[in-house]
């Protein structure tokens, strides 16, 4: 199916590329120095400088096509935003400087679609302005959260409030100094049908009864804001903090994940492009057995395979984004699941080749490849593990032949 970027989308992409060259790449070393100074969960001051520069160029909130016209930012379609997401993926903190980083992007989308007017004013507005960050609480330590119907945290109505009790973890970014609000998925009616038991609700981080427990790392890396366990003990929030209605949580989670997967996949391709560049540069700078590594036929094969893989991956994601814009997320569900499986696996191969070309240095903290590998490997679990997406793809294919097929 053909697709075409709009004039506005092409112009925004060129602006983002210029912004990366003028501001992001030159700031990488300073960002990492400041991050060490402020600590794991602190806020590097250079981000405010970069955010101001991005807003001055009109590069702000580019990911929300359905946001109201008076909201801050430029609203691009999923297709137009996809290559921008790839550019931002080349540097870990770049998305945040344009107010386009996860999990805020998905959280802003569902706050916009399902939040009460009070919630929008209290939480969506400062998120859109980049004044605060947010976290998303779905995964739980005691159940297999790849099946969302397993969610056990309870959300119970008590007069004009809801009361939360339970545990989450991998609430990414929750310990960030600027993270002020969570969106939490829990169970409101255990007796309802399997996909109507869950609801989503907005929980301020400073709510009494909300505490942190375990702080897992990812392959030994501790990301800014972490992925902590969050413990909810009789946490009370106003009833209109509920997003949508009781029982809407599962459907909202599916709506949230469509655009988010496009963003993740395109950022991942950006990581792959940077890994390929590192591979080529290292191959040119090292000599073994009388010639540069770049002269070795096997390494040339790895470089060529990486270029082919990344270009195929990009086309797959752009097609999915086009379908989301034209026929909707539900009709594009197979493609959305497909890219979520394919892209991390493709990019992991590229990173692995780059690590091999770097030799021992490739697995150290002195080059970005090991951290890249850790993050992209995690994506094979985040937002649904590969096996779940393959299962749903297979079921759709089978039902094309046998509409009554059930497991």
Image (cartoon, rainbow, N blue to C red):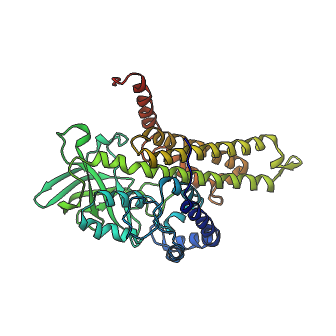
Quick one: 70 or 97, which is closer to the camera? 70
Quick one: 314 or 264, which is closer to the camera? 314
Q: Residue at x 40, y 56 (%)?
A: 106
Q: Residue at x 33, y 23 (%)?
A: 404
Q: Is residue 32 left or right of residue 245?
A: right
Which image quarter: residue 306? top right
In the rendered view, would you say 178 is above or below 147?
Answer: below
- Pick out the residue farthest to the left: 159
* The N terminus lies in quadrant: top right
On the image, the x and y values in percent for residue 48 come to 49, 76
Q: Is residue 235 left or right of residue 305?
A: left
Tell me, yes or no, if residue 93 can be seen here. Answer: no
On the image, the x and y values in percent for residue 212 come to 33, 60
On the image, the x and y values in percent for residue 66 come to 39, 59
Tell me, yes or no, if residue 137 can be seen here. Answer: yes
* The C terminus lies in quadrant: top left
Q: Residue at x 34, y 39 (%)?
A: 147
Quick one: 313 or 132, which is closer to the camera? 313
In the rendered view, would you say 177 is above or below 309?
Answer: below
Which image quarter: residue 171? bottom left
On the image, the x and y values in percent for residue 82 come to 53, 54
């Amino acid at each position: 199916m053909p697709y075409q970027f709009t004039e506005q989308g092409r112009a925004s992409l060129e602006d983002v590329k210029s912004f990366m060259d003028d501001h992001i790449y030159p700031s990488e070393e300073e960002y990492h120095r400041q991050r060490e100074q402020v600590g794991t969960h602190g806020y590097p001051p250079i981000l405010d400088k970069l955010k101001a520069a991005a807003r001055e160029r009109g590069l702000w909130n580019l990911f929300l096509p359905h946001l109201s016209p008076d909201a801050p930012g430029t609203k691009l379609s999923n297709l137009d935003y996809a290559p921008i997401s790839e550019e931002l993926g080349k540097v870990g903190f770049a998305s945040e400087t344009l107010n386009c980083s996860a999990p805020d992007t998905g959280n802003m989308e569902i706050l916009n679609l399902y939040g009460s007017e009070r919630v929008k004013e209290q939480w969506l507005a400062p998120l859109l302005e980049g004044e605060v960050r947010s976290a998303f609480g779905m995964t739980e330590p005691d159940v297999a959260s790849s099946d969302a119907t397993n969610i056990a945290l309870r959300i119970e109505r008590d007069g004009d409030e809801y009361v939360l009790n339970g545990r989450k973890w991998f609430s990414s970014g929750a310990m960030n100094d600027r993270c002020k609000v969570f969106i939490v998925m829990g169970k409101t009616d255990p007796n309802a049908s399997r996909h109507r038991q869950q609801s989503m609700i907005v929980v301020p981080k400073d709510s009494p009864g909300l505490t942190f427990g375990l702080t897992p790392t990812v392959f030994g890396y501790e990301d800014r804001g972490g992925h902590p366990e969050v413990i909810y003990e009789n946490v009370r929030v106003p009833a209109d903090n509920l997003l949508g209605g009781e029982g809407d949580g599962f459907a909202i989670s599916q709506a949230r994940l469509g655009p988010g997967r496009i963003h993740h996949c395109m950022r991942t391709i950006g990581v792959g492009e940077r890994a390929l560049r590192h591979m080529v540069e290292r191959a040119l700078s090292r000599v073994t057995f009388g010639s540069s590594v770049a002269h070795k036929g096997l390494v040339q094969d790895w470089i060529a395979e990486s270029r082919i893989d990344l270009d195929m991956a990009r086309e797959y994601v752009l097609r999915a984004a086009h379908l989301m814009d034209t026929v909707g997320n539900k009709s594009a569900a197979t493609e959305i699941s497909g890219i979520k499986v394919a892209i991390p696996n493709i990019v992991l191969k590229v990173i692995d080749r780059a690590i091999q070309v770097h030799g021992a240095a490739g697995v150290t903290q002195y080059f970005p490849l090991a951290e890249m590998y850790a993050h992209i490997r995690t994506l094979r679990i985040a937002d649904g593990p590969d096996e779940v997406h393959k299962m749903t793809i297979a079921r759709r294919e089978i039902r094309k032949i046998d509409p009554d097929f059930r497991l």
